[in-house]
Amino acid sequence: MKINIQIFFLIFVLVLVKAFNGSSQQVSVVMNPPVILIGEQVNLTLKVLLPAKDTYCEWQWPDSIVHFEQISKSEGKILQENGQSYFTQEIVFTSFDSGRWYLPAMPVITGAGNNRKLLLTDSIAVRVNYAIMDSSGVLRDIRPILSDPFTDYTWWYIGGGVLLALMIAYGLFRLWRKKMSNNTPLKRNHLSAYDEAMEALDAAGKIRLDSESGLLTYHTALSLLFKRYYGRICSESLMKDTTGDLLLRMRKDKLAQDALALLASPLRLCDAVKFARYHPDAKTSNDCAIQMKDGIAMIHNHSTSKAQSLAN
């Protein structure tokens, strides 16, 4: 009976030794270099021999290890060498604590499907030393402390602030002056607004239309005389308003709503000549003046009729 127990124990020990040797041959960890200075990097490479039936391998590397700081970790990959499969992965880490430290044994899981095998890496020692001291023996003088030159820019800041305030005040003054000039009622001359517009139309009709400068002068005069006329009707200056502003204002004004369709075309034609250098023929230019005259007359008639109805 004792002999059977001894034989069983011997067989159990042999199995354990074989399993241990098999595991140690399957997992290898290479560290380079084994001795570093504080802050230097260590490259650790894991290499696992995979049997043909194993299709995956996982290395359970902890998030943090005492005395060590992980810098990077590569993706694990499976390589083929001499007809055998190997799992390999690299980790770069460092240490800022001097001394002799040990990386603990790390679990490695291999297998295929639901069949898993747990392997352990060896515990590895890492020596972390201080930087080598200066052994030249040369004495070096301690230099005196250098004072940092300081320039006071207080008055520069004050001057810049005053200048900025003056520029803002000037801009606000120009804006206020422009607004006041636009809102200032036009001074009336001895002619009525309608008579003045008709007189300006007669003067524009004497401009020659056989040159580019004549066309530009003609259509500019038509645009200005209508702004002058409609500005006198509204009792404010409209000389700086665009054609779009005028048409929008006329659309809101009951007196000019009927004349809007008649005046929109000649006003836009004047803009095309002034800004787009459009060259209409003489007939188109004359028709432009006729339409503007009819539109002004329509506004004048509406205005006169309204004044008479209010008087009665």
Image (tube, rainbow, N blue to C red):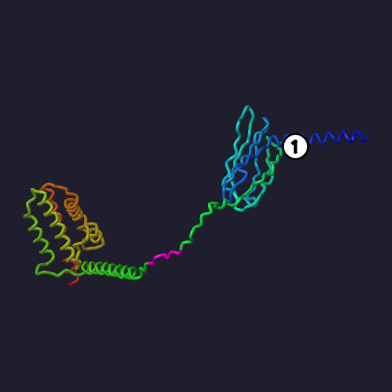
- Identified at 91% across, 33% down, the residue is 3
The structure residue drawn at horizontal position 24% and vertical position 61%, both measured from the top left corner, is 249
**Residue type at mark 1?**
Phe
- In front: 166, or 198? 166
Q: Secondary structure at mark 1?
A: helix
Does any portion of residue 297 appear in the rendered image? no
Please indicate whether residue 148 sits to the left or right of residue 80 in the image: left
Taking the image as drawn, is residue 197 in sight? yes
Label 1, residues with CA under 10 Å away: few <14, some 14-19, many ≥20: few
- Predominant SS along the magenta part: loop
Bounds of the magenta segment: 144-150
Instruction: Work out which quarter of the rendered image holds the C terminus and state it.
Output: bottom left
Which quadrant would residue 217 be assigned to in this image?
Answer: bottom left
Could you say where residue 105 lies in the image, as x and y percent from the top left?
A: 69, 44
> Where residue 11 sits in the image (x, y, percent)?
83, 33
The image quarter containing residue 83 is top right
Does the magenta-highlighted stretch encompass residue 266?
A: no
Residues 130 and 102: in front is 130
Query: Which residue is denoted by mark 1 in the rendering?
Result: 20
Q: Residue furthest bottom?
A: 311
